Image (cartoon, coloured by chain):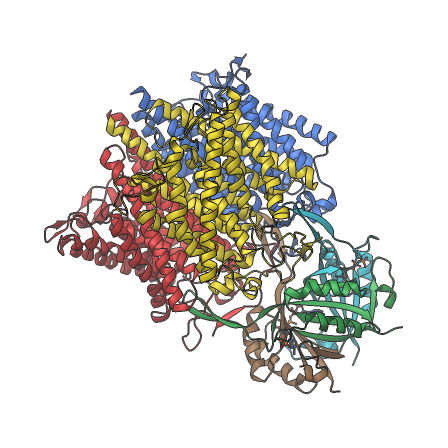
Chain colours: A blue, B red, C yellow, D brown, E cyan, F green
Amino acid sequence: MEDIKLVLDTIWVLIAAALVFFMQAGFAMVETGFTRSKNAGNIIMKNLMDFSVGSVMFWLVGYSIMYGVSNFGLFGWSGFVFYDDYTSLIFQTVFCATAATIVSGAMAERTKFISYLVYSFFVSVVIYPVSGHWIWGGGWLSTLSIGGAEGFIDFAGSTAVHSVGGWTALVGAAILGPRIGKYSKSGKSNAIPGHSLTLGALGVFILWFGWFGFNPGSQLAASSAEDAIAIGQIFVTTNLAAAAAAIVAMIVTWIRYKKPDVSMSLNGALAGLVAITAGCAAVSPMGAFFIGIIAGIVIVFAVEFIDKVLKIDDPVGAISVHGITGAVGTLLVGIFATDGGLLYGGGFGQLAIQAVGVVAVAAWVLPTAFIVFKTVDKIIGLRVSATEEQNGLDIEEHGIESYADFEIKGVTLHHGA
Amino acid sequence: MEDIKLVLDTIWVLIAAALVFFMQAGFAMVETGFTRSKNAGNIIMKNLMDFSVGSVMFWLVGYSIMYGVSNFGLFGWSGFVFYDDYTSLIFQTVFCATAATIVSGAMAERTKFISYLVYSFFVSVVIYPVSGHWIWGGGWLSTLSIGGAEGFIDFAGSTAVHSVGGWTALVGAAILGPRIGKYSKSGKSNAIPGHSLTLGALGVFILWFGWFGFNPGSQLAASSAEDAIAIGQIFVTTNLAAAAAAIVAMIVTWIRYKKPDVSMSLNGALAGLVAITAGCAAVSPMGAFFIGIIAGIVIVFAVEFIDKVLKIDDPVGAISVHGITGAVGTLLVGIFATDGGLLYGGGFGQLAIQAVGVVAVAAWVLPTAFIVFKTVDKIIGLRVSATEEQNGLDIEEHGIESYADFEIKGVTLHHGA
Amino acid sequence: MEDIKLVLDTIWVLIAAALVFFMQAGFAMVETGFTRSKNAGNIIMKNLMDFSVGSVMFWLVGYSIMYGVSNFGLFGWSGFVFYDDYTSLIFQTVFCATAATIVSGAMAERTKFISYLVYSFFVSVVIYPVSGHWIWGGGWLSTLSIGGAEGFIDFAGSTAVHSVGGWTALVGAAILGPRIGKYSKSGKSNAIPGHSLTLGALGVFILWFGWFGFNPGSQLAASSAEDAIAIGQIFVTTNLAAAAAAIVAMIVTWIRYKKPDVSMSLNGALAGLVAITAGCAAVSPMGAFFIGIIAGIVIVFAVEFIDKVLKIDDPVGAISVHGITGAVGTLLVGIFATDGGLLYGGGFGQLAIQAVGVVAVAAWVLPTAFIVFKTVDKIIGLRVSATEEQNGLDIEEHGIESYADFEIKGVTLHHGA
Amino acid sequence: MDKITKIDIITRPSKVEALKAALNEIGITGMTFSHVLGCGLQKGKTEYYRGTEYEIDLLPKSRIEIVVCEVPVEKVVEVAKEVLRTGEIGDGKIFIYPVENVIKVRTGEEGVKAL
Amino acid sequence: MDKITKIDIITRPSKVEALKAALNEIGITGMTFSHVLGCGLQKGKTEYYRGTEYEIDLLPKSRIEIVVCEVPVEKVVEVAKEVLRTGEIGDGKIFIYPVENVIKVRTGEEGVKAL
Amino acid sequence: MDKITKIDIITRPSKVEALKAALNEIGITGMTFSHVLGCGLQKGKTEYYRGTEYEIDLLPKSRIEIVVCEVPVEKVVEVAKEVLRTGEIGDGKIFIYPVENVIKVRTGEEGVKAL
Ligand SMILES: Nc1ncnc2c1ncn2[C@@H]1O[C@H](COP(=O)(O)OP(=O)(O)O)[C@@H](O)[C@H]1O
Ligand SMILES: Nc1ncnc2c1ncn2[C@@H]1O[C@H](COP(=O)(O)OP(=O)(O)O)[C@@H](O)[C@H]1O
Ligand SMILES: Nc1ncnc2c1ncn2[C@@H]1O[C@H](COP(=O)(O)OP(=O)(O)O)[C@@H](O)[C@H]1O
């Protein structure tokens, strides 16, 4: 019987791991689809390599930092290379890779390939594992208690995975500066449409599909009736939040821009998924629905804020989708958690813990990422030359054209109004 | 032990639900690939939104109509929003969304976006749940008995899902009228090739993959030896029908049009999948093989019939694939079912029940869909203006180009001979 | 309890089968993406049809040759059409189809469609099942014993599936001859870039995802703690080999060609997956890491060797990825197997058995494939006419354009330096 | 040698089929088509992409080039005007250029004979 | 009838926006853009695809065609030179062609009035 | 000022590489390529798409434009005829146009010196 339980838990986690792995394809398609064709191969390569480098480094080092014996609740340190639970290793590896790959979208179309490899190394070895340790590895956030509530709730990683990726993306994109032509001299933001909305949309559908591994898999067990019921409910909360956010993002763009924006609605679905990730097991379907609605509103304004106020150029909206809605979703657990949430009479304790967690992770990631990117920038340079950027990274960094048979527009059809 | 059984049933259904969800990506790719690039983003958006709207509405209302306490075997009415079996809810939600999304293909390239949203609402709230109730919700069809046979057999929904989608598509496409240029003044049908056969094909492969959730998942249980054996056999029948139908559709086009038609062979595979859906658990592999062969023949003539005789413009062949082969596949259960089928000495009883079911569902869907679309047409208009259609729905309805970097043909290369 | 075990084993194998089926989509995308747009629909059609023909023929005949009662350990002969283990049938069917579909890539852009269908027939009925019988069907290789070691180790089919496909591809591509323009008069190799790196990359991600069914599913059981632990470890070894190979292939191309080559790095990932397939359950993660590194080196030189020394035109690198790294990976089991491998003190026994297996399978496939292709060539012709090749197989063999809306380059942008 | 002239028509893509048919009817069979982007009186539009305004000010147009000897120039222009005129901005323009010679590669014929 | 002239500019795609803006400023509103591949003094480069060397010797260029009546030809050329010159190979070339006539389809106007 | 001439060759895409090489050999290095759709004596074909007949009557062609000063016009035409002639329909046509001037943006040189 214990054997059967072990089998059930293991197989469930492994199936989920496969689905989460597949999200790499989703990210690759979203990021390439929403950027220009002259950089399509480069962004693919970055996605391939952050996963590959991440897989190797997380196995060699990262997993031990995250799940090794804790040092003061700050980081783990034991194991390294040899583990006894390979099921856990692969599951955590694909999560780490998710955090890593978020960044390539925000830094797309102008980051030097080699510098991106260096970044991939550090995110898998240090940045992600440390805050991951705090939240999931038995670190201080997992045991934090405020006002009766205990433990930061980030079930599947709105903060541990998505915000970590999002904040790193924020720092990276800010240091890089905008793509040539993104802002006119007067500071006006110009539109730079992606080259394939269909591939971008395919990516979103793949991500949504993969999320049915990401969230329900984070139950980490499937051998009791409680597990089964919880997992079923997580499917529902995950799906409802995504659906609601997609609809709401569409409505908001319809009102603000006169027409329902396709790429923003797709971002909306992702925002809903990111937002529900922290609380998917803690909120009711109705709570998920509202979290989705909030995420759908937040994403549109977040994208505008990053673009027009901060003037940080994030071609695919990664900072907003993962960083900002990740943080918002984490906070909302404090409000919507059926056990301990503000709306359910749980008081402010859980909300406070959630806020501490969100802030603490940001406070860890932002400076660390800053140091990594700045150092890389100093030593090997973070950004390609203007000519390389104009000709495209595909031809300049890899010597290829991604669409060799197609006539590509030499004329830029769009420019800011 | 009961716990373990619950876990096994639940996890199986949830994994299947994830696969069925992924069929949304398949539909999106098929529909966008087989239509023109100027509408690529619009059709994506419709697919995204029928799923999102459907997810929300089916949770709020549809599920209760379908599975609530039955009223005279006609429709359910209880529950609403709060359910105790979330596993069932998510599984049924993705089935409902499948029915809904079929329609966007047939109505592609000319339907107003907002009107499509309204349609999505009604299909999830009324059209699909009511006939679904008859078949799966304990309604009258599920208990119908004729000549010794008892109960309409539609294991995974050739009728409950696919025909419902197909008949709705038929009504929608007929009311809309053909795309500009589809028929010349003399009534000759002109070819309007899709913009990406590769994306269309990818969609078909994704659908085939998802069907391994659709059909085997409809066992709804995986905790006994019988379940396991049945599920294994369903994999085989599903796959054989699809393979046979693809081959046969290819052969038929090869004979009729001199060359093996790619998009029709892809449709053939889908036709085989749709046709076997009703009987996948009731027929032998040999029966599935013949059902596939029949579906492969039917699909080619059905597409020609809809196009050239009825002169209804269905860009992706949705009416034929889902409506007609759905009906044919449902009827064939009465012939090939190893228990009760005509060929296996079961007499005409089951066949009669199947016929009643097919007719009854058509008799429900056709007028209801007619009312919905006609009302929408009257109040907000179902079709975009001619200029909008000519310029493409992407730019007119969403303000984007889906392939901003590519030179798109201004010259129409094809016209009717 | 026995019931539960049966359920667990069955469901695991079926989920894996679905994932392996999905690899068809991966192959289709890789092969179409890495070839020219004028043949995009044709290669899709070949992928669809080798799977469809293979599914039917393997059911009718192939499975019995492979798993029927053995005749002298050389081939099976019993069953045919009627089996009692359908779970095994579907799992083996998708494996057979994987071997079959490898070939279309190497023979792309110049093979007559009908001849490809004939080939598909023979690979599913004879070529694959016979060597499959030797290895997995209880045939002589599975019981071979040398120097204390016993049994050829090819856990998931580096040889049984991939090398079989690869060697068949080698023979086919060699007999066909290179595409027009591939080699200049002086024998210099010219580059013929593929038409969509993004679709090719998507295909690689899909294949990687599917491999989590291919390798772990080959455990064929998931009902004991040993199974669960083994499957977890297989996930890790599979993933690490792929990641390491992708990185190493990238580094090697970076050194040799000055820039990191995208399509070769993608091939690298596949090479790692193919190489680890034989030993995924027999080696440690560290062993897998080294197997990946070796595969990453081998693939680059193999592609060059096939292209520049043998002057065999393999548009997608199938011979190198599947044939050569398949063989290398199989051999490496004799070195890295923790139980019996050379490095672990097991002596040369296992390595010798591995070598015998690799050579024996090549000795079976090469001449058989030669006979099949030569006979087809004599009777119906293997290759299209020069005009058909120049105009593209899409328009000539299927009467379509795959990208009807896009401007395709009439001017050949690339030619050999 | 008769005078040879090139007529270059830039117009809406949706009109190309009709124009081709009409020209075929007056015996013109040789034509060359290409895809251009035009900017003229017809204005583009302002759209939003992810919240950022942008202007589409180059519109897809089709160019039809027909080389004829002098006599039918008027005829071609007339037919083109008839088929293309909708009275709305964007009907397009016809440019007439002198041609010095034409050579038919297959036969080596030159001048009007090459047409 | 005033002389009508076509100015055909072949240059870097990245300069098109600036050129269009500059021409707008001197009152030129009608223009036709297309995408060509050029081969001139500017050399292509040698790259590797899967280990095989290949040369990219045709570079993507943009063509801008402007038909004007004689007077502003110099002005257009001047503006173009100013905007396009970087001093590096690849700045492009301007070709001037005679035009015999122009017809505006919508109004039927001919010659300079049609511009 | 020497006479400047534009040679406009419309031919099969598969011949472009050979033509470019041959022109390079006679010292022509500046060329502009583009993709057009042609309609001439060469007929299209009738195919089926999902059971519906359709005609492909516009064939993909390549256009090569070369601006030269008068003397080598014959040479270019000769080379082109030699390389392109297969004797089958579809070999293509060569059109010769007068050019009024050429300006090289980088140097400001005009006329023949700009070539
Ligand atoms: N002076 C010009 N030079 C070059 N092309 C022009 C010129 N004027 C117009 N065109 C081309 O003709 C097209 C139609 O002209 P436009 O002024 O928009 O419409 P209309 O004259 O029919 O009202 C433009 O899009 C542009 O491509
Ligand atoms: N003689 C010519 N005939 C036709 N097109 C030419 C000719 N010379 C140059 N071009 C076009 O002009 C473009 C720019 O010329 P190039 O010699 O590369 O640059 P630059 O003259 O600015 O140094 C070329 O890419 C080609 O398209
Ligand atoms: N009168 C014409 N005006 C413009 N383009 C023409 C004309 N005649 C031929 N062409 C172009 O030349 C191409 C080749 O002409 P075609 O008559 O098909 O072949 P060929 O003359 O070699 O037998 C055509 O596809 C078309 O693009």
In the rendered image, residue D107, in percent from the top left (x then y), is placed at: 67, 80
In the rendered image, residue E52, in percent from the top left (x then y), is placed at: 66, 48
User: Is residue E27 visible in the rendered structure shown here?
Assistant: no
Is A358 located above or below residue B340 in the figure? above
Residue at 60%, 26% in the rendered image: A365
In the rendered image, residue A74, in percent from the top left (x then y), is placed at: 55, 16
Is D61 located above or below residue A169 in the figure? below
A287 or B400: nearer the eye? B400
In the rendered image, residue B213, in percent from the top left (x then y), is placed at: 34, 42
Residue with the most extreme left position: B148
Locate the N terminus of chain B by quadrant.
Answer: top left
Residue with the most extreme top position: A72
Direction from residue B96 to residue C127 in the image, left or right = right
Is E37 located above or below residue B86 in the figure? below
Q: Quadrant of residue F58?
A: bottom right
Q: Quadrant of ligand 3?
A: bottom right
A23 or A49: nearer the eye? A49
Residue with the most extreme right position: F1
Count of marks placed on residues: 0
F111 or A178: nearer the eye? F111
Direction from residue C34 to residue B121 in the image, left or right = left
Residue at 63%, 56% in the rendered image: A408
User: Is residue A402 visible in the rendered structure shown here?
Assistant: yes
Is A252 located above or below residue B191 in the figure? above
Direction from residue C388 to residue B155 in the image, left or right = left
